[in-house]
Amino acid sequence: MTHIGPLIDAAKQRDPRAVAKLISMVEDADPALPGVMSALLGAGVQAGPAYIIGMTGAPGVGKSTTTSALIAHWRSRSLVVGVLAVDPTSPFTGGALLGDRVRMQVHATDAEVFIRSMASRGQLGGMAAATPNAVRILEAVGFGVVLVETVGVGQAEVDVAATADTTVVLLAPGMGDGVQAAKAGLLEVADVLVVNKSDRDGADDAVRELRQMVSTTSDRQPGSWRPLVVRTVATAEGGISELIEAIEAHRAWLNASGDGERRRQARAAHEIRAIALAMLSSRIGLRPDDPRLAELASDVAAGRIDAYAAAVQLVSSVS
């Protein structure tokens, strides 16, 4: 642990290499990580919790362009901004497939903006398994706003709501309108719905359809938040001010209703559960390449045993 001290000190100064190293430790499940997280908590850099915004939606709707515009807004208010862009995993390297993040490169020279691409590594729900701890690291070293942009895989992309304070769902005319959003379950996780590329044909219909869906949703309790629907043309920064107003309105509601604290506690419980399961898996010696797992998988695939029975056998064999 002697080499960790200088790394922590550098990260506290938001040195990008040090912060990147800490996030790599999270991704690689480094054995020193528990000590690192404890040391970061004791550093006391961040005066309060970061405001975490999830950006999600299907590929091609303009998430990265919109994220770039939001970065510019918060930087204009002198806030330090962190971005975790969760990308599909390369089948060759195991790394983030879209790691260049060309649409955010305008902020690359800003020392108060940290952008990191993370590979999803097959994780369902559009999120990398390491994302919550990576968010904690950015929060601990003083990033006031953290934007989490997810893979964009469509119907599985809902896990971002477990990590974010405010979830922004982007759609585009002709690319999976309100009906598709409802099918994907995105309406349930959205705090703000954005029809981007709204200079295209069909934008008015998409906005009207989404607003109708929101207004007729029957399972929302009185006093609960109803998603706002805004329209943007992110490439020209059109509608970005309206999007920011919607995000800030949701943030104010979180604080006034107490739902913000509830979400933070639920997020912490989710993190604890995930870490505990990983610890238990490590303690009992169960690895993805375990030959016992491979043998049972062969039996399940061949129909000789069902998956539940296989899981019971596996747990019994490693206990």
Image (cartoon, rainbow, N blue to C red):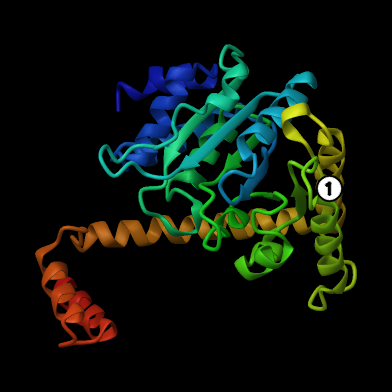
**Please, is residue 44 above or below residue 150 in the view?**
above
* Count of all numbered marks drawn on residues in the image: 1
231 or 311: nearer the viewer: 231
80 or 158: nearer the viewer: 158
Residue 200 x, y percent position in the rendering: 77, 43
Residue at left 33%, top 41%?
A: 90
Is residue 271 shown left or right of residue 288?
Answer: right
Is residue 303 shown left or right of residue 6?
Answer: left
Examine the image and state in which quarter residue 36 appears.
top left
Residue at left 83%, top 58%?
A: 205
Is residue 306 shown left or right of residue 133?
Answer: left
Residue at left 83%, top 66%?
A: 214
Is residue 309 shown left or right of residue 102?
Answer: left
The quadrant of the image that shows the N terminus is: top left
55 or 58: nearer the viewer: 58
Residue 32 x, y percent position in the rendering: 31, 36
Residue receiving disc 1: 230
**Please, is residue 266 above or below residue 220 in the view?**
above
The quadrant of the image that shows the C terminus is: bottom left
Task: Tell me the kind of residue under disc 1.
Answer: Val
246 or 273: nearer the viewer: 246
Residue 136 x, y percent position in the rendering: 54, 40
Q: Is residue 225 visible?
A: no
Furthest residue to the front? 201
Residue 196 x, y percent position in the rendering: 74, 43
For label 1, the crowd category at 10 Å Cα-Cα, with few meaning under 14, some 14 to 19 and many 20 or more, is many
Q: Is residue 174 visible?
A: yes
